[in-house]
Image: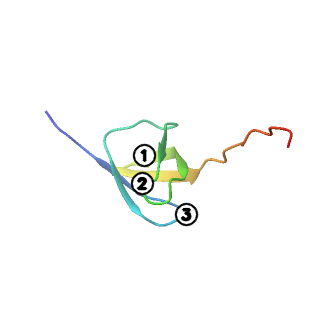
Amino acid sequence: MSTATLTGICPECETDLTVPPVVKGETLSCPECILTLRIEDIKDGHLTLVMVEVQLRDWGQ
């Protein structure tokens, strides 16, 4: 059984990421800057990642 991993680079802090098999559209967090990233494309074992904007709740303060 193969335990293939995928690689990518965080677009914010440029940390090299190695992750287990994932699919396009999934999200993950960068372990360095904690940014939420979405997988835009997977090509030849390399991930294309983009930042996901997180909407914070407005608590009316």
Is 34 situated left or right of 19 in this image?
right
Identify which amino acid the numbered label 2 is placed on.
Answer: Pro
In the rendered image, which residue does mark 2 sit on?
Answer: 31
In the rendered image, which residue does mark 3 sit on?
Answer: 12
Residue most extreme to the front: 61
Q: Position of residue 38 (x, y in %)?
A: 54, 44
Label pair 2/1, CB-CB below 8 angstroms? no
- Secondary structure type for disc 1: strand
* Between 12 and 61, the one nearer to me in the picture: 61
At label 3, counting other C-alpha atoms closer than 10 Å, the crowd grade (few under 14, some 14-19, many 20 or more) is some
Q: CA distance from mark 3 to mark 2?
A: 12 Å
Q: Is residue 45 visible?
A: yes
Is 1 situated left or right of 51 in this image?
left
Residue most extreme to the left: 1
Identify which amino acid the numbered label 1 is placed on.
Answer: Ile
First in residue order: circle 3 vs circle 2? 3
Label pair 3/2, CB-CB below 8 angstroms? no
First in residue order: circle 3 vs circle 1? 3
Residue appearing at x 71%, y 42% in the figure: 55
Q: Quadrant of the C terminus?
A: top right
In the rendered image, which residue does mark 1 sit on?
Answer: 42
